[in-house]
Image (spheres, grey):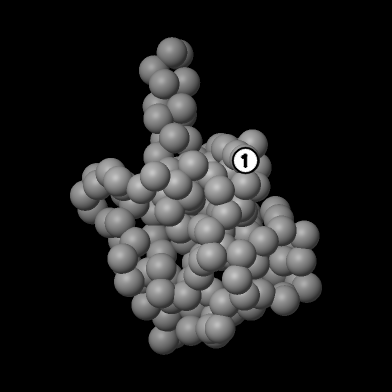
Amino acid sequence: MEAGMQSTQSTEFRTSQSTARHMPTRECSAPPQQAPDLVTVPARQGLEAVDILRRGAGDCVGPVIHDDGCDTLGFLVPPGTADAWDVPGSTCTQTQGRGVGQAAPVPPVEGTGWLLPPGDVELATDPTVLREALGEAARMLEAADNCR
């Protein structure tokens, strides 16, 4: 993590009472006025979440970056998301304009690559929809792991 970045990591499981069902919201469709925050998850869970988001009715998924060295995925989310992020197993970082930008044609850090590059998708992933997709992905992976 770059100097000056702040992150929060949840240690409790909380369920969202949202009624969102993969439909775009104003947060996800409107251009952010500030630098986006970055939600980082293990690659396996993140890939499942991307599939869930892309299958959803709204296809409300923003740029996603893959870090080969850490085997993680990062979802760009609207600024301010880190202030209330509470999803176990993930971290949300306030980028404060450093490292990640909406129009970054090349990945901002060596050893990373865009899974879904800016310009090909929404400006940012709706955090409510992402929270639900990550929860669904975790349940699917747990069920698959228990079948072995």
Name the one closer to the observer, 119 or 90.
Answer: 119
Residue at (54, 45) in percent of width and height: 22
Residue at (30, 56) in percent of width and height: 86
Q: Read off the residue under disc 1.
A: 57
In the rendered view, does 67 fall on the left or right side of 9? Answer: right
Q: Determine which quarter of the picture holds residue 119.
A: bottom right
Residue at (53, 59) in percent of width and height: 25
Location of residue 101 with respect to 28 vertically, above or below: below
Where residue 40 appears, as percent x and y from the top left, is 48, 58
Where residue 12 appears, as percent x and y from the top left, is 21, 49
Mark 1: few/some/many CA within 10 Å (<14, 14-19, 20+):
few
Is residue 75 something one can see in this rendering? no
Please tell me whether mark 1 sits on a helix, a strand or a loop: loop
Residue at the top extreme?
147
Locate the C terminus and report the quarter of the image it occupies.
top left
Q: Please, what is the three-letter code of the amino acid marked with disc 1?
A: Ala
Q: Tally the numbered discs.
A: 1
